[in-house]
Amino acid sequence: MTTFELLLKEKLVIISRGVPKETLLEAAEVLADAGIRFLESTFDHRIDNCIEENAEKIAFLKKRVGDRIHIGAGTVLNVKEVQAAFDAGCEYIIAPNTKEAVVKETKRLGMYSMPGAATATEICDAWDMGADMVKFFPADDLGMHYITNLRGPLPHIPLMATGGVNPQTIPEFLKRGINAVGTGITVLRPDLVQAKDYAAISALAKEHIQAVKDALK
């Protein structure tokens, strides 16, 4: 089974945004133990050294849990970040937007490409550029009915919903034809991260995994 086939099976990506490195490494162990198989570490463009900072996190994650979790990079906005993510060991690239240069470089380097889009035109453009899956964002603002309407003419393009994903909404997203979901703060909750409450993070991860399983029954 390829990494992408496993993603289509597992359907859940946990997003790490702004989590300190040491805390993230400990949390990643907990997530792996809970059964999470996909973890995205995002570039933080608020800081000057965001490329080096996230590349370091990714490299450490690969060493720590790379045998159990597939590591990707998120909020990838330019080709320099694509290259840095690849060099650090990433398998897939996720972005909130679609930029052809980013998609093409991702594919050239042999990684899976998941650019972001919201409209039918944007989704089709991303697909035509070579995306493996399109990040449907912001899913909660656009709504479930919108997803149903998109899926009418575009059932062939894999979509990953982010925004508003939680154990209560996961079944509905999947029912509407979404192929995978991504969420960060409903598992790596800022208060739990700050408190280093790994037991609570593990419990939330398991709730999300169970929601996917229940939806697929």
Image: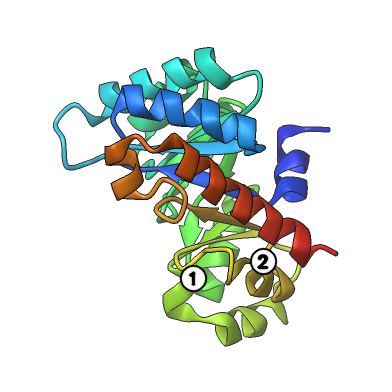
For marks 2 and 1 on the same chain, the one whose residue lies earlier in the sequence: 1
Q: Determine contact: label 2, label 1, CB under 8 Å.
A: yes
Classify residue 174 as left or right of residue 88: right
- Image point 70% across, 55% down: which residue? 210
* 199 is higher (above) or lower (below) than 162: above
* 133 is higher (above) or lower (below) than 169: above
Residue 58 is at least partly visible in this image: yes
Classify residue 81 as left or right of residue 50: right
Name the spot of residue 144 as percent of width and height, x first: 58, 81
Q: Which mark is residue 139?
A: 1
Q: Which mark is residue 172?
A: none
Q: Residue furthest left?
A: 48
* 119 is higher (above) or lower (below) than 29: below
Name the spot of residue 169 as percent of width and height, x first: 58, 71
Q: Quadrant of the N terminus?
A: top right
- Image point 46% across, 65% down: which residue? 137
C-alpha gap between disc 2 and disc 1? 10 Å
What amino acid is labelled 2 in the image?
A: Ile
Q: Quadrant of the C terminus?
A: bottom right
Q: Residue furthest top?
A: 63
- Image point 52% across, 45% down: which residue? 14
Which one is nearer the viewer's eye here, 28 or 6? 28
Other-residue count near label 1 (Cα within 10 Å), few / some / many at <14 / 14–19 / ≥20: many
The residue singled out by tag 2 in the image is 178
Name the spot of residue 146 as percent of width and height, x first: 56, 84
What amino acid is labelled 1 in the image?
A: Ala
